[in-house]
Amino acid sequence: GKSLIHRQLMQLSFLENVTVVVGFRGRELVDHIWDVRRDVKIVINHDYLKTGTAGSFVLGARTATNRVISLDGDLLIETIDLVNFVQQDANFVGVTNRKSKLPVLVELNRDKVTKMGFEVESDLEWTGLVNIQKEIALSLGANHVFQGLDTHLPISALQVNCFEIDEPEDILNAESWLMESEMNHE
């Protein structure tokens, strides 16, 4: 009964410095965001049609003081896992068991991601979660975050329980995942 961004903003209510980068349908999204939390900073990616996820991430990173967290707008994540991820002081990416149709897969060696990409042989996928120093975030370029991270590998991995919504049919599966997740924490 709530939007993904509403859920994420509530999960991040313990953080004071939250920035949301908007592009497509930005005005509509800003109004909704401010209905949920008036303290959120908004950054507009006017070039969202020409840039990948890193383009937006870099814009948002400019507002940070030290560490930068990337949380894609299409991700449902268990609150306890998100809180744990955000509170890390080292550079981390979030990984989960492979379940997406077109995942960015990760190769691990001793809990460190050594390779990321569509052609990697793995049962683990990158969730889109990133917790890194601001300087690294600003260096990721304008393509996709995982491509920008390539020169910073190896990077620590933290397994999280999450569900990414990419396709319309994912919504039904996400609702089931959410109900199951909430039942496990009652």
Image: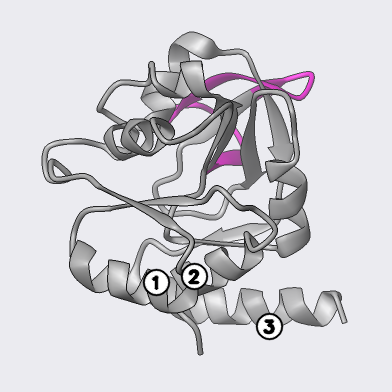
- State the image quarter where residue 159 is shown: top right
User: Disc 1 versus disc 2: distance between alpha carbons?
Assistant: 5 Å
Q: Does the image show residue 123?
A: no
Q: What residue is pinned by disc 1?
A: 34
Q: Residue furthest top?
A: 151
Secondary structure category for the residue under label 2: loop
Depth check, front residue: 128 or 122? 128
In terms of depth relative to the viewer, which is nearer, 153 or 2?
2
- Residue 84, position as x, y percentages in the image: 77, 47
Q: Which residue is identified by label 3?
A: 179
Marks 1/3: CA–CA distance: 27 Å
- Report the amino acid beneath label 2: Arg
Q: Residue at x 70, y 63 (%)?
A: 78
**For the residue labelled by badge 3, is the local secondary structure a helix, a strand or a loop?**
helix
Q: Mark 3 or 2 closer to N-term?
A: 2
CB under 8 Å between discs 1 and 3: no
Q: Is the Cβ of the residue at disc 1 closer than 8 Å to that at disc 2?
A: yes
Q: Is residue 161 left or right of residue 47?
A: right
The correct choice, above or below, for 160 with respect to 144 in the image is below
